[in-house]
Amino acid sequence: MNRRGIALVLVLLAILVTAALAAGVLVAASTQARASGDASLALRTSEAAERGQVAAAAAWSRDSNITMPIGATAGPVVARYADSTTSIAFVTRLSRASYWISARGRAPATGVSVPIESRIGVLYTLHIPEPRLAATVSVRDSFSISGAARVNGNDTPPPGWGSLCPTASSTIAGVAAPDTSRVCDGPCGSLGSRLTGAPPKQPDSLAASAASLSQLGSVTWTSLAAHAAHVFTGPAVVTPTARLTSGPGTAQCDTAASDNWGDPSRATACANRFVIIHARGDLLIDGGSGQGIILGDGDVELRNGAQFFGLVLARDDVVASIGSNRVWGAVVAGDTRRAASLGPGDQTAIAGGSQIVYSSCALENAFLGTASLRREALRPWTRLY
């Protein structure tokens, strides 16, 4: 036997085995590197999808709460990020108060790899105020109505709002108070024609209580105030007017103007703008018109033909005496400072040609138009792919 020949064969076999092992190591290393790169890309696309749905929620216009039909889809909302990923998101309305945001994150192809995508869906809901409204006007203490003033508990749509208003609901009480003997209608103690409702006066031990002002269904006074479009400190005088941006092109609603509280006449681009107004002191609405929700830490007064469409909440009194003022919706007055007796004094009062008219349509649109999107707290999202 030729020992040198056998040795040569063994050496060649050893070289082949070593080469095969080396090739295997290189293939494994390459595969692992590619897998690691793909995993990194997958993570980046997931992050892009998450950022995309957050961006879509942040960019959501509350006007769409009024105008968007159930089942409709809005978008796309497209964003590009510094790590070369992109996101595209769509918003679908599921019901009156719920939305589904689907977002796709995408990383571009690198080398021989194909683009990688991730997609998620997230449930958002509107946190809509649901105040306890026992009557058109709810007061904690006393209420005076005189002259040609009226409180009307018959559900009435605002003029020109036909397309926004469903069938009117039933009549509610005119005025609710813990002690209806402190509700003055014409000659105190007698029931005149100034109060209309079922009944005109409603005894209610919880009317305009501190608790009902603080907790409005699942929404609190504090959370509403945190989302106020405009905040006024100290005694404030405002004549609300729908304002449009100037410049070339189609005029847009100027949301930055502190006296722009929307357009209840529905004649301009501000028609679907409903606002939360927070007055940290007394607020005087001196003429003009607006729509939404007023939160008054003190008194809220309407004067010189002022009109408001929605809900007026005042920790103290609501007053409308000079001119033909109108509130379409409802009024709640907490009477922080209480009058010693009926008659002139510190109390909620309307006089002159002022009217407070119950309108479920004005309230519903004010609540929807001021509600913000919030991500559901319990299992709000799912990975789609």
Image (cartoon, rainbow, N blue to C red):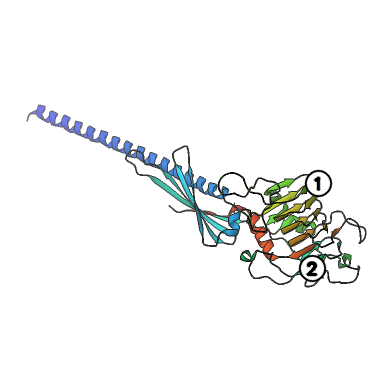
- Amino acid at pointer 2: Gly
Q: In which quarter of the image is the N terminus?
A: top left
Q: Which of marks 2 and 1 is nearer the N terminus?
A: 2
Residue 294, x across and y down, in percent: 73, 54
For disc 2, the marked residue is 174
Q: Is mark 1 on a helix, strand or loop?
A: loop
- Which of these two is toward me, 209 or 34? 209
Residue 60, x across and y down, in percent: 57, 51
Q: Is mark 2 on a helix, strand or loop?
A: strand
Locate residue 346: give its quadrant.
bottom right
Mark pair 2, 1: CA separation = 29 Å
**In the depicted structure, whether residue 66 falls above or below residue 79:** below
- Which of these two is toward me, 65 or 307? 307
- Amino acid at pointer 1: Pro
Residue drawn at 39 percent across, 45 percent down = 116
Residue 141, x across and y down, in percent: 86, 60
Q: Can residue 237 be seen in this view?
A: yes
- Which of these two is toward me, 129 or 351? 351
**In the depicted structure, whether residue 261 falls above or below residue 14:** below
Residue 119, x across and y down, in percent: 45, 50
For disc 1, the marked residue is 235
Q: Are marks 2 and 1 in contact (CB under 8 Å)?
A: no
Q: Can residue 46 be seen in this view?
A: no
Residue drawn at 76 percent across, 59 percent down = 212
Locate residue 115: give its quadrant.
top left
